[in-house]
Image: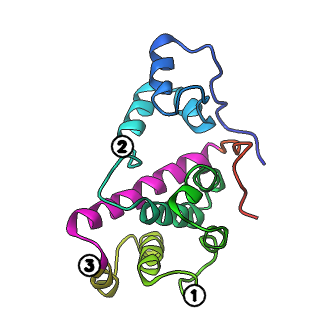
Amino acid sequence: MQRPRIAPLDPPYAPELAEELSRFMPPGIPPLRLFRTLAHNPRVLRKFRLGSLLDRGSLEKRDREIVILRTCARCGSEYEWGVHVAVFAARCGLTQAEVAASLRPGTEDTLWSPRDRVLLRLADELHDFATISQALWFELSRFFRADQLIELLVLAGFYHTVSFVTNALQIELEDAAPRFG
């Protein structure tokens, strides 16, 4: 692992920054390295938190996590993929086999349901082409409403951004987070 390009801030934090960082994590859990790195720019940190789609949205948690894991895997963001595996995957009903399959190319693995497969294809097509084919859009529309389709697109875009940041800043992997290999 390379050294981070910008080291995460360490406590003690200025009061305003401490308050903002406390909004990212449950009480008693220290902020992740990503958040402490973004804290070098408090405005960006705040906008990042406000742009997050981990709240109660229109998507099922499992659907959201499939898109996040596949997007991070395709972008090579071992940091963010690992954080989501550690914190959310099991809670959302993803099996260890599905988590491992999120790293593999293709969507024909029989462990995925038809709904899961269209989510994987969405992440793949957006990553490869920055758009969705008409055929995939038709399939997605069979499973998801208009508000959900919009959220899926924004979710994939947000996690491209997160992947760009974690990769470009070479943020050190979290100790408890799984690795790609």
Say few, some or many: other residues with alpha carbon within 10 Å of mark 3 (under 14 / 14 to 19 / 20 or more).
few
Q: Residue at x 38, y 49 (%)?
A: 53
Q: Amino acid at mark 2?
A: Gly
Q: Which residue is identified by label 2?
A: 51
Which range of residues does the magenta coloring cover?
143-169
Secondary structure under the numbered disc 3 in the rendered image? helix
Residue 159 point in image, percent of width and height: 47, 55
Q: Which residue is identified by label 1?
A: 110
As drawn, is 79 to the left or to the right of 50? right
Residue 32 point in image, percent of width and height: 60, 36
Q: Which residue is identified by label 3?
A: 141
Secondary structure under the numbered disc 1 in the rendered image? loop
Residue 78 is marked as: none
> Which quadrant of the figure has residue 12?
top right
Label 2 with label 3: CB-CB less than 8 Å: no
Observer-side mark, 1 or 3, equals 1
Question: Which quarter of the image is occupied by the C terminus?
Answer: bottom right
Observer-side mark, 2 or 3, equals 3
Q: Amino acid at mark 1?
A: Thr
Query: Is 48 rendered above or below residue 123?
Result: above
Secondary structure under the numbered disc 2 in the rendered image? helix
Mark 2–mark 3 Cα distance, whole angstroms, equals 25 Å
Q: Is residue 144 magenta?
A: yes
> Which quadrant of the figure has residue 129?
bottom left
The mark that comes first in sequence, 2 or 3, is 2
Closer-to-camera residue (157/107): 107
Q: Is the stretch drawn in magenta largely helix, strand or loop?
A: helix
